[in-house]
Image (cartoon, rainbow, N blue to C red):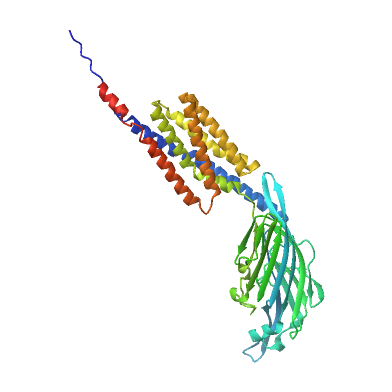
């Protein structure tokens, strides 16, 4: 008597195992976006804490400084006829800007540390000089000379944060030294600063000069109020950012010993005139220019950029893992994929925490080395093959090196990234052609 053995028909999972596993890996890759997003939020939180520390230290030292002035404020009488035949006499003001304004400054940087953070501060020694032509303003504004009260004029000097003044400021006004007082009578021209009462001979050209020791945080700006404004700055700070409405001319130089910069701004390149009457106000500080002392490297910004590549890194690692599984014909549990994914995410927390002490580049090397060692030792325990573990070390090291270069680049990051991804895709396609994706299905058919 013969016995017939019938093979069980393969299930849907057995027939589509590779396809299902591929979709599962894709889902796990997307699932890893959750811890990556949490890491990104942690980076933002630490960066916000840094900004709070910078503001706190700056508030106790002095904030960003914008120097505006000197500006002449001259009162004059305005006669207005009344209905009853009388005449109302009121006092108004007009404002006069210098014909020439020369600024020569030396910026001495200082770094203050609070907890893990470094704050860039500075002290500056400024020499400001120039000249006025009072008669030109009266002619341009068409004010009767007999109505102008030249003897009651004031000179205004705008300073954003007067706490930054380290000494009294005396202006040399036509060879007469006059100590300037705190406050400004008319804050519609400058919000805060100093003033001094001066007497003016309208027929005489006025020369002035003053020295000011001003400290501040990060930014030092100047307002180009002269008909011709020239400014020169020098410092030992190696990482300046020239900012504002005007850039330095060709004489600007940045080296390992610091920087020097020179600006020349003409009246025709501004949006406000040399003189105007009260009631016609201009926001002259919008035309300010100057320098910003920036930190050499912003570890939080670089860490945030590296987190943005997390999905790319996790996806490529998972697919390499999947190809090894196909080539070695060895099942890898989804939980093992998750553990590898969490190891890749912990890399970013290591990078963030270590970079706060060592800087970004050393932290990246330490965190990448630790992560590669952890994952590759885990790979060896799964496949029991030193060759596979070594290949995985090379693959992960190449990926971390590729991401590191992308983070360092700014202008060419998109170009380098696109070329790199194209090469990676080409390599994956080349090696994937050797995989027999339907070998398991054919085996099932033979068994049937």
Residue 282: x and y, percent? 61, 73
Q: Quadrant of the N terminus?
A: top left
Q: Is residue 83 left or right of residue 197?
A: left
Is residue 10 in sight in this rendering?
no
Extreme-right residue of the structure: 176
Extreme-top residue of the structure: 1
Quarter of image, res 3: top left
- Residue 2 versus residue 415 in the image, above or below: above
- Residue 96 versus residue 53 in the image, above or below: below
Is residue 234 in sight in this rendering?
yes
Q: Is residue 287 left or right of residue 379?
A: right
How many labels sit on residues?
A: 0
Residue depicted at x 40% and y 38%: 428
Q: Quadrant of the C terminus?
A: top left
Residue 188: x and y, percent? 65, 71
Residue 379: x and y, percent? 48, 28
Residue depicted at x 55% and y 31%: 373
Extreme-left residue of the structure: 1
- Residue 336 versus residue 288 in the image, above or below: above
Camera-side residue of 92 and 163? 163
Camera-side residue of 242 and 145? 242
Camera-side residue of 135 and 125? 125
- Residue 295 versus residue 348 in the image, above or below: below
Camera-side residue of 224 and 234? 234
Residue 184: x and y, percent? 72, 70
């Amino acid at each position: 008597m013969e016995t017939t053995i019938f093979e069980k028909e393969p299930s849907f999972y057995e027939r589509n195992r590779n396809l299902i596993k591929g979709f599962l890996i894709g889902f796990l890759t997307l699932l890893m976006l959750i811890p990556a997003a949490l890491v990104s939020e942690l980076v933002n939180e630490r960066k916000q804490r840094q900004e709070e520390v910078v503001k706190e230290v700056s508030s106790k030292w002095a904030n960003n400084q914008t120097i505006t002035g000197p500006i002449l404020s001259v009162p004059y009488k305005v006669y207005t006829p009344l209905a009853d035949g009388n005449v109302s006499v009121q006092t108004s003001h007009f404002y006069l800007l210098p014909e020439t304004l020369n600024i020569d400054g030396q910026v001495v940087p200082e770094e203050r540390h609070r907890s893990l953070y470094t704050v860039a501060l500075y002290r500056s020694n400024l020499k400001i000089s120039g000249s006025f032509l009072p008669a030109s303003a009266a002619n341009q504004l068409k004010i009767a000379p007999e109505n102008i009260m030249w003897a009651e004029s004031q000179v205004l000097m705008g300073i954003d944060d007067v706490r930054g003044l380290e000494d009294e400021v005396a202006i040399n006004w036509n060879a007469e030294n006059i100590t300037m007082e705190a406050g400004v009578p008319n804050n519609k021209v400058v919000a805060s600063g100093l003033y001094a009462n001066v007497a003016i001979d309208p027929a005489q050209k006025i020369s002035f000069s003053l020295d000011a020791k001003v400290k501040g945080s990060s930014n030092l700006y100047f307002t180009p109020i002269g008909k011709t404004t020239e400014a020169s700055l020098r410092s030992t700070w190696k990482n300046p950012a020239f900012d504002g409405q005007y850039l330095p001319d060709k004489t600007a130089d940045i080296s390992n010993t610091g920087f020097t910069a020179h600006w020349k701004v003409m009246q025709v390149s501004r949006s406000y005139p040399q003189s105007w009457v009260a009631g016609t106000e201009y926001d002259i500080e919008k035309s300010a220019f100057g320098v910003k002392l920036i930190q050499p490297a912003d570890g939080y910004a670089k860490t945030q950029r590296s987190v943005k590549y997390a999905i790319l890194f996790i996806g490529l690692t998972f697919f390499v893992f999947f190809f090894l599984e196909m080539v070695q014909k060895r099942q890898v549990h989804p939980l093992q994929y998750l553990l590898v994914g969490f190891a890749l995410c912990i890399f970013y927390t290591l990078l963030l925490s270590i970079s706060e002490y060592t800087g970004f580049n050393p932290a990246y090397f330490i965190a990448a080395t630790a992560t590669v060692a952890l994952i590759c030792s885990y790979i060896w325990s799964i496949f029991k093959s030193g060759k596979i573990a070594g290949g995985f070390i090379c693959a992960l090291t190449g990926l971390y090196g590729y991401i590191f270069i992308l983070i360092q680049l700014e202008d060419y990051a998109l170009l380098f990234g696109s070329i790199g991804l194209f090469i990676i895709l080409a390599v994956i396609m080349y090696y994937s052609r050797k995989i027999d994706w339907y070998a398991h299905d054919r085996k099932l058919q033979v068994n049937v």
